[in-house]
Amino acid sequence: MAKVVAELKYSAEHEWVATDGSGPANIGISAVAAEALGDIVYVDLPEVGSTVTAGETCGEVESTKSVSDLYAPVTGEVVEINDDVVSDPALINNDPYGAGWLFKVAVTEEGPLLSAEEYAAANGGEL
Amino acid sequence: MTENYTALYDQHKLAGASFTDFGGWQMPLKYSSELAEHHAVRNAAGLFDLSHMGEVWVTGPDSGAFLDYALAGKLSAVAVGKAKYSLICQEDGGIIDDLISYRRAEDKYLVVPNAGNAAVVAAALAERAAGFDVVVDDVSAETSLIAVQGPHAEAILLTLVPAEQHSLVTELKYYAAVEVGITVNGAVQDLLLARTGYTGEDGFEIYVPNGDAAGLWDALLEVGAGHGLIPAGLACRDSLRLEAGMPLYGNELSREGNPYAAGLGPVVSLKKESDFVGKAVLAELKELGAGSTSGRRLVGLKGLGRRAGRSHYPVLKDGNVVGEVTSGQPSPTLGYPIALAYVDVEHSEPGTALDIDLRGKPEPFEVVELPFYKRQK
């Protein structure tokens, strides 16, 4: 079963958010979502310097079988994107919580986020 | 919807498959990674459960004449031992299904329709049999179908065939079938082996009674492991057939479409003397230039960017809708997006620049010759 990392928070749209309270938040998609999508072959990320809004779409993730919107789990300015994942989207399947991270945001406001327990309970992941 | 399970369902579950509904059947979508399965079939071998496909026997002295009437092709001209790709059409020329018919004897054919259409095809055949001296027997429920596809398929299969019968396999031609002894559960069983497939690679399809299906599946996995064989699901079956430019019923073929628009004109035998269901309308459509000078035509599209078109996305020329995608995805073998689409015939020439409307963003594509991928022989 797909892993859910206890230290992270999650949106209902399957993005995870890592915050340490000081620096920008790191954002990716959960292993549950990566597994459901299948092999990811393309990712379209927001541009550095743009502002994303919690709950709104900010990019796309394309697998061999389908295209899905990427939703911003927080509001704020995008300060960095993961160029490695753009050139090698399989990183999202292989290491969704590590090398497969997507972008970082200087958060002004968090969207409604779930704890790992809540997310796992709702989506069948394994803590 | 009725959920049907093949005789291999437990095998798939044990192998960790994720499942999808296909034509009313719970079928393995993939076991691990659909890309890995795709590459295994192109470079080594893949093992497919196709037991959801139908099997209908047609026997009796009028078998050839009956199938000439019921199907669009001239089945009476098929030599015993050979197979033919054909269509079963409606009176209005619409396509009920595409199917493969194997002539097993002068008076005996095996007709293989698609999963979702098996019952409809069996019923249409039974109805069309009125007045012919034939028996139509739908054995889909008792019959499993296992495919071994890929460049190593022959070597894998031979390990289960007695040495004195090897030449039956090695000399078997594409679109031909033979009864051959295959070792299942320690005993040699005579099974129908066809050199056919839906992947663009060399390969075989084996018809086996449900009771022996799991034994054959396990035996092939065991002897195939050293040849790079892995179980392969419907996700890679779709990407493989798309690269090979093969139509999928429900995507490229439908009751609303017609064979000429689908590029399947050569499958329709207007020349055969006998009447057949749909003949009058199909002759008219051909006269009108359907798929060549009028209407839309199925073409291959190659993406110039990285984004793939998907089924039902509009195809644009200078911002105007001139067609619709029926199947599309990134090609794992070729490394660029590919699609099949119906486009207005005036924009169907290879080299024509078109766009696919990707959810509001036009993405450049170019019309190319089919198939996208052809194996080296």
Image (cartoon, helix red, strand yellow):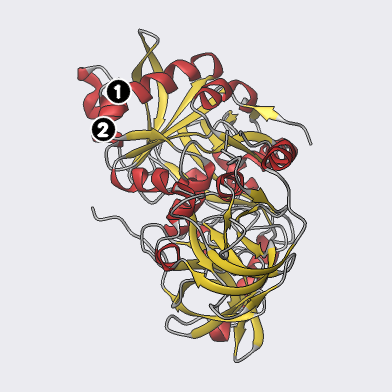
Identify the residue position indicated by label 2 in the image. Answer: B227
Q: Is residue B35 visible?
A: yes
Say what secondary structure mark 1 lies in.
helix
Q: Identify the mark at residue B280; answer none if there is no mark.
A: none
In this view, A7 is above or below B72: above
* Direction front: furthest residue: A22
- Chain letter for the residue marked with disc 2 in the picture: B
Q: Residue at x 46, y 30 (%)?
A: B146
In this view, B347 is above or below A123: below
Q: Residue at x 52, y 65 (%)?
A: A43
Q: Is residue B290 visible?
A: no
Task: Classify residue A118 as left or right of residue B351.
Answer: right
Circles 2 and 1 in contact, beta carbons < 8 Å: yes
- In the rendered picture of this protein, how many numbered marks are placed on residues? 2
Where in the figure is residue A98, as x and y percent of width and height? 46, 51
- Three-letter amino acid code of the residue under disc 1: Val
Mark 1: give few (<14), some (14-19) or many (20+) Cα within 10 Å: some
Q: Identify the mark at residue B223; answer none if there is no mark.
A: 1
Alpha carbons under labels 2 and 1: distance apart:
8 Å
- Three-letter amino acid code of the residue under disc 2: His
